[in-house]
Image (spheres, rainbow, N blue to C red):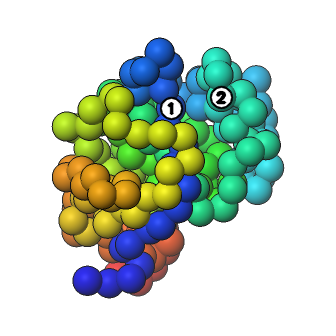
Amino acid sequence: MSGEFILKGRLWVLIENGKLLSDIDTDMIYHNAHLAVTDIDEMGQFAFGNLEGYKDFADKAQPGDLVLAGDNFGSGSSRQHAVDCFKALGVQAVMARSFGAIYKRNAINSGFPIIELPDLHDDLFSQFDMAELNLEAGILSVGENVYHGNPMSEVAREIYLAGGLFQYAERM
């Protein structure tokens, strides 16, 4: 197993009233008021700026962090900023029970890891637990607990290793 596919970091658990937050749309991830920002390095400061309870995420996030959410993460528009803002902050990956289809495609094309963990339970995580994510196997380990999900597809892994779809295409 390749080391590039094992990510270790601090876990941001997006939770409210003991439940993983679901239906976090791209406007909550990256508000449309900031769409004129085109420099990816500047996008991080607006991450979750429209998500109640997490508006300070950009100030508190650290490179290497991992994000965990409920169902349908990234639903809504095809807003690429909603992927790039995490990359700008150094967030390594987002895990959720499921993702919006367009968000999923944008993340893969950007070489940004997302992992679906459809069997996640709401009450098993604490904010800032240390976690290990195996992208190849689709396994999240938090302490003694192990959660099995969907591994990255072969194509998604190759795009990730290349650094994005355009870089992947250049290699072809």
The one of 8 and 165 positioned closer to us in this rendering:
8
The one of 97 and 85 positioned closer to us in this rendering:
97
Residue 68 percent coordinates (x, y):
44, 41
Question: In the rendered image, is residue 21 in sight?
Answer: no
C-beta proximity under 8 Å, tags 2 and 1: yes
> Label 2 vs label 1: CA separation?
8 Å
Residue 28 percent coordinates (x, y):
59, 24
Image check: 158 left or right of 146?
Answer: right
The one of 118 and 16 positioned closer to us in this rendering:
16
Q: Residue at x 42, y 34 (%)?
A: 69
Tally of numbered discs: 2
> Residue 19, relative to residue 83: is it above or below?
above
Residue 113 percent coordinates (x, y):
42, 58
Residue 14: which numbered mark, if any?
Answer: 1
Residue 159 percent coordinates (x, y):
38, 69
Residue under label 2: 54
Q: What element carries label 2?
A: loop
The one of 171 and 54 positioned closer to us in this rendering:
54
Image check: 128 left or right of 50?
Answer: left
